[in-house]
Image (spheres, rainbow, N blue to C red):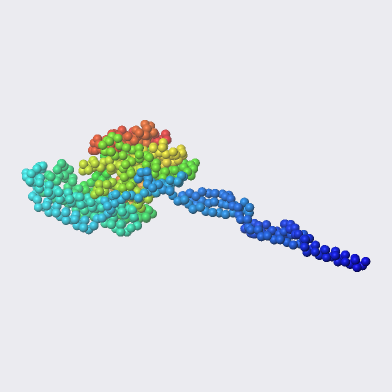
Amino acid sequence: MKKTVSLALVFVMLFTLVCSTVGCQHVHEFVLSESESTPATCVAAGVEVKVCSCGEKQETKIEPTGHEMKVSLQTDPSCTRPGSIDYKCVKCGKKEYNNVDPLGHAYEETPSEPSRVIRCTREGCLSCFWGEANDKHKEALTFNFTKEDEAAIDAKYEEVLALVNAAAKYDPALHGYAEEGALADEYAAVDAVHTELYELVMNALSQRQLAEIAYYCDMKNTELEETYSYMMDYHTAVVAKFYTLSRPFYDSCYREFYYYGMTDEEINAFLFDSDAISNPEYTALKDRNNAIEAEFVALSSSDQKKNISVLYAEFAENNNKMANLMGYDNYLEYAYENVYGRDYTYQDVTAFSKYVKEHLSAVFTKTYKLFRNLTGYSDAERETYYGQVKYPFFENLEGNTLVNDYIDLMAFTSNPDKMITFSDEFNKLMVDGNMFRGQYDGAFVTTIHSAKLPIAYFGRGYDNCFTVVHEFGHFMNEVYSADVAEENDEFSQSYDLLEMHSQGNELLYLCYLEENAGMTEMAHRLVETHSLVNMLYVVMAGMTIDSFEQAIYLNAYEGTNADQIMADGKITHDEYDLLYTSICADYGVEEEIGDYWLHGMTITSPCYYVSYSVSAISVLQLYEMAHTDGFDVAKDAYLKLFTYVDENPEMTMNEVLAYAGMLSYSDEELYVNLKNYMNKK
């Protein structure tokens, strides 16, 4: 029995062993253990841990999930400013900032017209630049005067002088004028040589102009400064030399040919002037004044103001001496008649100044204070204003566009045969290379004789829209009158009339802006008031400067502080400041204009500034006309200031004004009308 139980037990144990090792083993059941697992992040790997009930573990590496970046903020780039794109991971909040390079300007390949700046075509971008000139006139407008040219003038002069000295002395019984004959043929041969000399001299004078322009464009260039100074002195010398031929021709058998068409009175006056100009005393005075002007221009603004009194005292004294040599009592008489060709004398200005004091001084003060007290404008409106009166026309898209659009309206209709329009000439000027920009503080237009070409210069601070319009008025007169000037050697125009071409153009442009600029009311008010203040300032400054110059050249003054200024019977240079502020007090504008004379126009443009005043008074009526009768009526009146030459180029300035339907500067009614109209503004 015991033996049976043991066998059974063995059997059972054997069965269990077989079952464990063959078909009845343990199966793991792994369950995620969150406490032992580490989740993956955007940048770090994770671990997934699973545990079996038997205690065994299973680990699995989980790769980083990576960021899921989405745009959170985006700024688009412009032509000049970079843009940016900001990203943020929606899972972890990480931020990234990416800059976007500026786009750069997308300039049009060529402007629609040469006078219009080349603009960026990207919407909202106002960037523009001035295209380069085509150098059409580069050769004609490059200074190239040499010692060989001086020698050629000397040789030609000696040739003419030898021919005249070899001729028979004048005998009225033998040497009368005749269109044909041996004497006529003989004179024609001499005149041909004299004409060659004249052209050489005129080329030298043109070269002096070119030396001046080159220096103005680069005033830090000492070589250009020396050349300009030399040519100023040479100008005086060569003109004096040319006029020494006047007497030999008069004494020769060629007298009635050389002076043909002149009366005895005119001949005597010409001979007197020739003797004076060629007088060594005259040329020495002229050279010294050239040196004074060059010294003054080269000084800084602050040094100019410190030194001007002493410089001007000598300058004015020299001018009076030169006028005496020319047969005049003082430089005022000489300048009014011979330099500026005015229809009035310096004594006549007494009446004009009286009208200005009575009718326009208060208007100026009122307008000046109105402008100074303008407030309530936005930054954008101020920028619009600056775009017209401060920023360069050549770098200002909005201003450039408005000026061009105005110019397009201006066309001469009275003489279609001339086929001249403002727009065509504006484009030629801006692209052909006869427009200059430089460092000299000023703007002007002049004609280079040798090239028969008008040029325009715009210095720093003198290149805004209104200045460009101003100078282009001068330029258009040079163009429109060129054929008359070429056909008639005697043709000349008063400087007062020349300023009407420029100042009138400014006022018409101002009227154009009112209707066509798209400005806000306040922006236009800023531009308008500034322009009117500027024009009235010209009136007052011109009158006060002329009164100042009259006091200096005549050594006489009867106004405010006269007892102090004339105490010793002479106005000395240390009294100039007091004199000018006293004159401004006489006009009631001491606060507004007080030290204007210190800018030096009395040296750079002696006795000229009354022309600015008289012309500004005359053309202010165009502004009134545009508002009462319409822009086209004012425009037609303005254009007649040019086209009168087609009717009669010998008109006086008052006749030109009457032809244009305008009142004269000598008529008190004009001053009254302006006062009444301006007081309504």
| Location of residue 304 (image quadrant) | bottom left
Q: Nearer the viewer, residue 418 or 679?
A: 418
Q: Nearer the viewer, residue 361 or 178?
A: 178
Q: How many marks?
A: 0
Farthest residue in the bottom direction? Answer: 3
Where's the N terminus, which quadrant?
Answer: bottom right
Residue 617 vs residue 56: left or right?
Answer: left
Can you give x and y, in whole percent of width and height, for residue 630 in the image?
37, 32
Can you give x and y, in whole percent of width and height, for residue 658 in the image?
29, 34
Say which residue appears at 14% left-offset and 43% top-offset. Answer: 260
State whether residue 318 is above or below residue 475: below
Can you give x and y, in whole percent of width and height, for residue 614 in the image?
32, 40
Residue 155 vs residue 426: left or right?
Answer: left
Residue 176 vs residue 132: left or right?
Answer: left
Where's the C terminus, which quadrant?
Answer: top left
| Location of residue 306 (image quadrant) | bottom left
Say which residue appears at 26% left-offset and 41% top-offset. Answer: 481
Farthest residue in the top direction? Answer: 629
Evaluate whether residue 589 shows in this view.
Answer: no
